[in-house]
Image (cartoon, grey):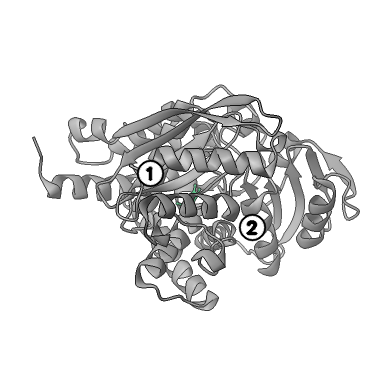
Amino acid sequence: MSDEANPFESLQSQIDDAAAYLDIGDDVIERLKHPERVLETNLTIERDDGDLERFEAFRSQFNGDRGPYKGGIRYHPQVSRDEVKALSGWMTYKTAIVDIPLGGGKGGIVIDPDDYSEAELERLTRSFAKELRPLIGEDRDVPAPDVNTGQREMNWIKDTYETLENTTEPGVITGKALDSGGSEGRVEATGRSTVIAAREAFDYLDKDLEGATVAVQGYGNAGWTAAKLIDEMGATVVAASDSSGGIYNADGFDPVAAKEHKNETGSVVGFAGSEAELTNDDVLTLDVDLLIPAALENAIDADLAEAVEADVISEAANGPLTPAADEVLEGKDVFVVPDILANAGGVTVSYFEWVQNRQRFYWDEERVNEELEAIIVDAFDALVETYERHDLENPRTAAYVVAIQRVADAFEEAGSWP
Ligand code: GLU
């Protein structure tokens, strides 16, 4: 992984690339390149041994022109103010490209959660929820899971908020467990949209997904779900990796068995169905039909991009390619389905969860998946229409052209408030 690119600068350069094709004033574009506000807070909690420890935490509310700020909360040592700002911007354009009535936000705590007990994580999460309380709400800002957070953390945040507000408001947060007001299909949603988007790209390029070879970098929730679903669609998953390394089998392996191995041992490495061990970089540069980066930002820099041999990339992670890598891949005719569309299934089903919470009426999984499918296919069609109309080289630019226009329209239609 390279740390050469600051993700916030990457976001801004992606916006600039798209702005060249848009008839929107520089003053409006300038607004759309910066968050509306960022909360920076220090959380001090008691460790199990009685000592106190301080943690830095952030929540960036990037844009609320199209609806309540929306986006996850991650727990990771790499979290920073700029990272959270970038991720909140990507959320803004993600909710816009899939055309759901939400804005963009993101939060994070600088922590390696593996080093803390469940009780410590609960105290920390509740402490963050207390700080977030004045900012969040089902009509204000609706957090969700992200890297290293899931149903457990969302349930704690919901409970803290509802207790302090003396109300029931499950729509204040999404990605909850089913019994706490979560939605069917939410856990699989990010991986599901990643493979729907890949399938659409293969169709568009007249390539056959049946028998296509696939490499998946990152075997967390999004990565492993994408591996399982693409295998069910008839593709062959030949490689996967996590932070400990990678596995490979030219004939393919069972993604579910690889996940079971990871559950038991903590990593995909050592999986019996693998015939060779690879590094993370090896997995990213394999000669496969489809590459799914499903880990963190900046996984592929310009140097690594030179070595990428995949024909199609569907970005399950947020920001896995640096702008320089994007340019290299454009020159090599690699079709990249951008993160803001490919991984938008997560926030789309979060939107369904929020709708169900507000209506206190719950859908079955079939309905969730059908509605998700329709939204991702429509977004892909909008991308392709713009990609062809402007004769663009990079599908990411097409996605931003569509998304920025939608946000700018909402901003301009609202008029100005002195
Ligand atoms: N963290 C996910 C993302 O990056 C989901 C956000 C949400 O559901 O609000 O898209």
Determine whether 31 is above or below 292 in the image.
above
- Disc 2 residue crowd, few under 14, some 14–19, many 20+, Cα 10 Å: many
Image spot of residue 101 (x, y percent): 31, 57
Which residue corresponds to the image point at 24% horizontal and 41% vertical from the top-left? 22
Is the residue marked 2 within 8 Å of ligand 1, measured from its CB?
no
Q: For residue 33, which quarter of the picture?
A: top left
Q: Are marks 1 and 2 in contact (CB under 8 Å)?
A: no
Is residue 119 at least partly visible in the picture? yes
Q: Earlier in the sequence, mark 1 or mark 2?
A: 1
Which residue corresponds to the image point at 86% horizontal and 41% vertical from the top-left? 277
Q: Nearer the viewer, residue 276 or 220?
A: 220
Amino acid type, mark 2: Ala
Amino acid type, mark 1: Arg
Please give the residue where the numbered disc 2 appears in the rendered image. Answer: 226
* SS label for mark 2: helix
Image spot of residue 29 (x, y percent): 25, 34
Image spot of residue 23 (x, y percent): 19, 41
Image spot of residue 345 (x, y percent): 49, 58
Q: CA distance from mark 1 to mark 2?
A: 34 Å
Determine whether 37 is above or below 118 in the image.
above
Asked whether, in this view, residue 274 is left or right of residue 160, the answer is right
Please give the residue where the numbered disc 1 appears in the rendered image. Answer: 133
- Disc 1 residue crowd, few under 14, some 14–19, many 20+, Cα 10 Å: some
Which residue corresponds to the image point at 38% horizontal and 60% vertical from the top-left? 169
